[in-house]
Amino acid sequence: MKKYFLLLYILASGAASHLFAQDLTPLSVEYTPFKGGDFVGPSFQADIAVPVVRQEKWMLAVCPGYKYQALEQDDFVTDNSLQELSLRTILQYKASHNTRWQWIVAPSWSDPFTSRAGWTFNSALIFSKMNPVFGYSLGLAYSHRYKNNFLIPVFRLQWKPVENWTFSGRMPLNLNVRYAPSSRWNYGVEISNNVISGESANQNYDWLWVRERSLALFANRRLAGNWWICPSVGYTFSRQIRSYTLPEHDTWSISGNFGQVKSDIVNEANERGAFLQLGLKYTLGY
């Protein structure tokens, strides 16, 4: 069973702005009750990986996910929240013990439970090679959102030079350094990107986009079995809130960021602030 979930993680490790899962985690729930700043409030995120087919060389899984971001209303931001419901479908071919090909198809629906529901689409083809010390992933992704079409290179590295230390990173700027002194504790620091967007009811613009770049310190504690409680505290050193109008025609470009688009900006605000996050995970990575 442990090997099964390990394969499922490698399978899911190509998915998302969130073409990547984390920490050998089939189930993850995160709640951020406090975010410093004037434009955003609490946020919530949940992801689960569900196997559908498993054979010697082939595997198929679906990974539903949900994101919620509360917004503070003012003259600029008139919507009270952004929501995103996603369903990643992941097909893997295991070419050898350490080599895998993955194809990810990931539609998502913004604000699916409101009258302003919209949709976006991501897909990627990724090659991964891993061993107990070093691993990497290379690939090409396609993203469609709000009449913007992107081709995006995918690149990820993981290095475990000694038993207790793990270093990992991916494009764009995501870095994680983890120290595990025992089987019940691990600590570390992470630089991460988080993006959420959604269509808007505001008459002056068509949709909103929020991107956060953050530095966090975490200390994860095993509760029982493979269940972990995962608190973290950190600082968002860049939070961009933008409103856009839809372009008249579809556009195509090459980008290094799944969230960035090239529509006309109506309003823009930048802020920063400290945050507190609480997480609960079922993980087999430690």
Image (cartoon, rainbow, N blue to C red):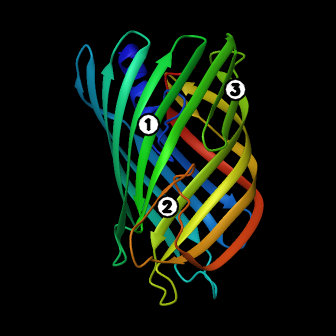
Q: Which residue is mark 2?
A: 68
Labelled disc at residue 27:
1
The crowd level at tag 2 (other Cα within 10 Å; few <14, some 14-19, many 20+) is: some
How many angstroms separate mark 1 from mark 2 (CA)? Answer: 17 Å
Q: Quadrant of the C terminus?
A: top right
The vertical placement of 100 against 26, above or below, is above
User: The disc labelled 2 sits on which kind of residue?
Assistant: Tyr
Measuring from the top left, give residue 262's x and y in whole percent. Answer: 54, 67
Q: Are marks 2 and 3 in contact (CB under 8 Å)?
A: no
Q: Which residue is mark 3?
A: 178
State the residue at coordinates (66%, 73%): 39
Element at badge 1? strand
Viewer-closest of 216 and 185: 216
Viewer-closest of 180 and 120: 120
User: The disc labelled 1 sits on which kind of residue?
Assistant: Leu
User: The disc labelled 3 sits on which kind of residue?
Assistant: Arg
Measuring from the top left, give residue 207's x and y in whole percent. Answer: 48, 75
